[in-house]
Image (spheres, helix red, strand yellow):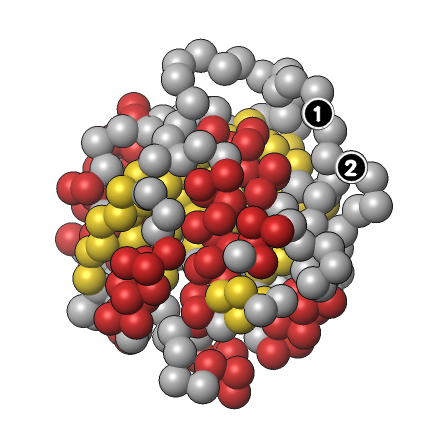
Amino acid sequence: MTGVQTCALPISARPDQWDTNGPPVTTALLLAAGAGTRLRSELNGLPKCLVEVSGTPILGHLLSSLVEQGFERLVVVVGHRGDQVRDYLDLHADGLEVECVESHRYSETNNIYSLWLARDLLQESFVLMESDLVFDSRLLRRMRVSNRIAVAAFSPEMNGTTVSIDESGLVGSFSVGGLNRRPLSHKTVNLYSLSWPIWQEVGRRLDQRIAAGKVNDYYEVVFADMAAEGSFPFRAVEFDNGRWTEIDTPADLLAAEQLFSEALVSPLLRS
């Protein structure tokens, strides 16, 4: 299981304790190019982001969350069965301005390549998200402040990239991928909010890696390098006090169905 978090306590309504300089982020980037090979038995000819959780495709949950939290623009990197993703966006964007970019190399590259492909469409601060996430939309509210990273306390059933968090809430270091590495204290939720200046630096480093042929890296290796150099000023946004799940396997999908049962999801998500 890649990670499921739930808590009976309501999400805190207290204001963010960190700086809120600048207007709220209103643009999101969604990486939706992958084939979802670990979920193949559940796909039935669909792209991964159109697999249903509690009667609504994953992409539908994400679109509802973005609209509910005031986002205005969405850039989507598509690849595997991209036409189906575009068709769904055409019918369900609900007022979002949507632009798509095609990854023709999705079957031979990793998410670093998808992020790099979007570089020319993003000239502003934005929230980066992956298309296998479902979460309470209220959790997205605190990600509308630039230079944030969504995290949850690490538990043994989780895998993937982990980070350390210092006493002030700043990210200290990354353990990328989680394979053959000692996990750090918090699991990343694959939601990042990047300011325009930070994105410019990330883009420069992406250019270097892609030019060097490193198209199978995780994009987090760039963040890890910047954190090691002290140039990744991101603060953690803890998702432990709400429901979220990352869906990579059939077991993850089953857990998501249980977590986001029809009785729990909001009317907006069910529509």
**Is mark 1 in CB contact (under 8 Å) with mark 2?**
yes
The image position of residue 52, as x and y in percent, is: 53, 70
- Please tell me whether residue 206 is drawn above or below residue 125 in the rendered image: below
Q: Position of residue 249 (x, y in %)?
A: 58, 75
**Residue 34 at least partly seen:** yes
- Looking at the picture, which amino acid does disc 2 mark? Pro
In which quarter of the view is residue 36 placed?
Answer: bottom left
Picture disc at residue 176: none
Q: Which residue is mark 2?
A: 10
Residue type indicated by callout 1: Ala
The number of discs equals 2
Q: Is residue 203 left or right of residue 194?
A: left
Task: Tell me which corner region of the image, top left, top right, bottom left or bottom right, holds residue 45.
Answer: bottom left
Residue in the foreground of this view, choosing between 94 and 142: 94
Residue 268 horizontal/vertical position (percent): 56, 49
Label 2, residues with CA under 10 Å away: few <14, some 14-19, many ≥20: few
